[in-house]
């Protein structure tokens, strides 16, 4: 039964079939497919993503498009994943002892996956330049670094934002490795999220938010060192963004304190209440920022909504990704998925939220939310860059919307 590890320490049915390392690998492969779909749809919408992230364009029309190269890489990764999982099933037959004994096999696949995705020079035909760019970007942002605008700053921000949604996936990867190297441990055993000490997993989960927080402070410093104008402002927006990422830390801290309360007694009610407050602040602040700042929608801006030709309530004049109904649906979805933590409050769903299958689904939902977020964040950056006569690309613009000229999947005013 897929239940509470404190009561059922043996392997649950889900982990027998789909051990933790394979779940991590599945989400990584899924991310490659998702990025390819992002590139493909935005390309069809007339949005040049490579130019926004300062990625070199194709030198010849005969070269495959960026999304096609990404699809090819994802296909190879998926084929290797399917082969590795089938081999694991063939050797283990869902037998608990064999699942524990063959734990090196999924870790070997993870090493191959990371090698193909980031390092392997023998797959040069599969988006080699893209993987080279990924390595350089990861090196820069791994300590919270941020390129200048002309060198691909938006790409750094986009990737770092994506990493925040993979915080739990990174924590699971750490847990799998920790259990593998632990004496008498196994990477395919029931996940021990206390492996390595009380604070190691929380620290791993906090790192992506720390990266984005430092990037925001770097942007603030650049504004303060430059010439302050009406369009650039004094940098307060970047401090507010840094504050948003800092709200993730109380959630992690109080969750850890609850999980590690001693004496076998329920955690103090104060920890639980503080955790709920921290979750509410983080979720609502992040939701507001998604809608008002990352997507430049006017839902929370009464002054912007009063513009006479803003015919779609709470949106903006230019819509590239789809019709207004799509934006309303995405806003509602973003709010719901920002609040998945609320499942633990329910007396009926709280226990289910701690099952391994449920944890995996919640991780998938967050990855899905971020995938959808990318479409609208990139669209917003594209619109900001189109307004070359107005404020700079780093500023929040008064959104504009017209839906008078529709061509295919592209919704915008072409005047």
Image (cartoon, helix red, strand yellow):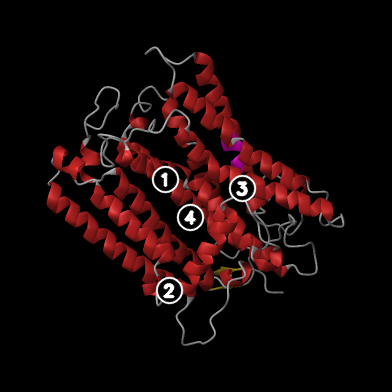
**Residue 69 shows which numbered tag?**
2
How many residues crowd around disc 1 within 10 Å: few (fewer than 14), some, or many (20 or more)? Answer: many
Seen at 34% across and 33% down, the residue is: 192
In the rendered image, which quarter contains the N terminus? top left
Q: Position of residue 338 (x, y in %)?
A: 51, 40
Q: Position of residue 195 (x, y in %)?
A: 38, 33
Residue 286 is covered by the magenta coloring: yes
- Where is mark 4, residue-wise? 371
The residues bearing labels 4 and 2 have C-alpha atoms spaced at a distance of 19 Å
Label 3, label 1: how many angstroms apart (C-alpha)?
Answer: 17 Å
Magenta stretch in the rendered image = 282-287
Which mark is first along the chain, 4 or 1? Answer: 1
Of circles 1 and 4, the one toward us is 1
Which is in the foreground here, disc 4 or disc 2? 2
Along the horizontal axis of the image, is 83 left or right of 257? left
Element marked by disc 1 = helix
Does residue 356 belong to the magenta stretch?
A: no
Name the residue: 64% across, 69% down: 404
Disc 3 to disc 4, C-alpha distance = 18 Å
User: Please, is residue 322 above or below residue 365 in the view?
Assistant: below
Q: Quadrant of the C terminus?
A: bottom right
Residue 121 visible in the snapshot: yes
């Amino acid at each position: 039964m897929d239940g509470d590890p404190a009561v059922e320490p043996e392997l649950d049915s889900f982990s027998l079939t789909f051990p933790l390392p394979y779940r991590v690998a599945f989400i990584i492969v899924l991310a490659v497919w998702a990025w390819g779909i992002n590139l493909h749809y935005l390309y069809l919408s007339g949005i040049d993503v490579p130019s926004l992230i300062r990625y070199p364009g194709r030198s010849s029309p005969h070269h495959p498009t960026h999304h096609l190269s990404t699809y090819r890489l994802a296909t190879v990764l998926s084929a290797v994943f399917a082969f590795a999982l089938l081999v694991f099933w063939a050797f283990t037959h869902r037998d608990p002892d064999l699942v524990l004994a063959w734990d090196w096999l999924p870790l070997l696949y993870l090493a191959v996956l990371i090698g193909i995705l980031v390092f392997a020079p023998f797959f040069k035909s599969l988006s080699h330049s893209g993987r080279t760019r990924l390595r350089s970007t990861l090196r820069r942002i791994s300590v919270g670094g941020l390129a200048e605008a002309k060198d691909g700053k938006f790409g750094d921000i986009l990737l770092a934002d994506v990493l925040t949604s993979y915080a739990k996936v990174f924590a699971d990867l750490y847990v799998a490795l920790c259990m593998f190297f632990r004496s008498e441990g196994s990477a395919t055993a029931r996940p021990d999220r206390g492996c390595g000490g009380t604070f190691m997993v929380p620290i791993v989960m906090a790192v992506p938010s720390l990266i984005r927080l430092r990037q925001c402070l770097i942007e603030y410093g650049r504004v303060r060192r430059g010439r302050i104008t009406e369009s650039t402002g004094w940098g307060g927006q970047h401090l507010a963004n840094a504050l948003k990422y800092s709200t993730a830390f109380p959630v992690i801290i109080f969750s850890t304190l609850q999980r590690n309360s001693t004496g076998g007694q329920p955690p103090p009610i104060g920890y639980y209440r503080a955790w709920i407050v921290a979750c509410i602040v983080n979720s609502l602040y992040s939701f507001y920022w998604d809608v008002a700042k990352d997507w430049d929608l006017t839902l929370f801006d009464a002054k912007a909504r009063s513009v006479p030709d803003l015919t779609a309530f709470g949106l903006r004049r230019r819509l590239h990704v789809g019709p207004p109904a799509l934006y309303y649906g995405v806003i509602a979805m973003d709010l719901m998925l920002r609040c998945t933590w609320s499942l633990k409050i329910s007396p009926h769903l709280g226990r289910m939220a701690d099952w391994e299958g449920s944890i995996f689904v919640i991780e998938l939902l967050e990855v899905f939310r971020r995938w959808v977020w990318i479409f609208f964040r990139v669209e917003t950056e594209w619109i900001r860059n189109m307004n070359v006569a107005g404020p700079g690309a780093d500023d929040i613009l008064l959104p504009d919307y017209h839906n008078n000229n529709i061509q295919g999947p592209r919704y915008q005013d072409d005047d």
